[in-house]
Amino acid sequence: VYGPLAPDGTPSPLPLVSASAKDPAGWVEPVPNQQLAFRTTGQCETVSLVPFYKIADQKYVVYWKVRGSSA
């Protein structure tokens, strides 16, 4: 879990990333027409990735759970 508890007191789940060992950055792509904005791709849920200065008052993750594959 990460960040503060939700309003109902439950913890926020940590996103799980599936990535290939041969292409570890293959799970992220730039957001068109936005500087320094990225998003996950090919995952169960889409997660936005932006610079820290834009999210100072929001939840954020520095470490990710990664489920790798050799493909």
Image (cartoon, helix red, strand yellow):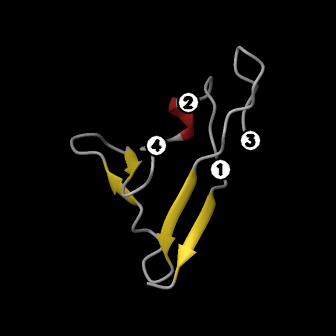
Q: Earlier in the sequence, mark 1 or mark 2?
A: 2
Q: How many residues crowd mark 2 within 10 Å: few (<14), some (14–19), many (20+)?
A: few
Q: Residue at x 64, y 44 (%)?
A: 61
Q: Earlier in the sequence, mark 3 or mark 2?
A: 3
* Contact, mark 4 vs mark 2 (Cβ under 8 Å): no
Q: Residue at x 50, y 64 (%)?
A: 18
Q: How much space separates mark 4 and mark 2, taking CA atoms?
A: 14 Å
Q: Is residue 70 above or below residue 65?
A: below
Q: How much space separates mark 1 and mark 4, taking CA atoms?
A: 13 Å
Where residue 41 sits in the image (x, y, percent)?
36, 55
User: Dividing the image into 4 quarters, which one contains the N terminus?
Assistant: top right
Three-letter residue code for mark 3:
Val
To which residue does mark 2 refer? Answer: 55
Q: What is the quadrant of residue 55 in the picture?
A: top right
Where residue 24 sits in the image (x, y, percent)?
48, 73
58 sits to left or right of 71: right
Q: Residue at x 70, y 14 (%)?
A: 7
To which residue does mark 4 refer? Answer: 47
SS class, disc 1:
loop
3 sits to left or right of 34: right
SS class, disc 3:
loop
To which residue does mark 1 refer? Answer: 62
To which residue does mark 3 refer? Answer: 1
Give the mark toward the camera: 3 or 1.
3
SS class, disc 2:
loop
* Contact, mark 3 vs mark 1 (Cβ under 8 Å): no
38 sits to left or right of 58: left
Three-letter residue code for mark 2:
Ile
Where residue 35 sits in the image (x, y, percent)?
32, 43
Q: Earlier in the sequence, mark 4 or mark 2?
A: 4
Q: How many residues crowd mark 4 within 10 Å: few (<14), some (14–19), many (20+)?
A: some
Three-letter residue code for mark 4:
Val
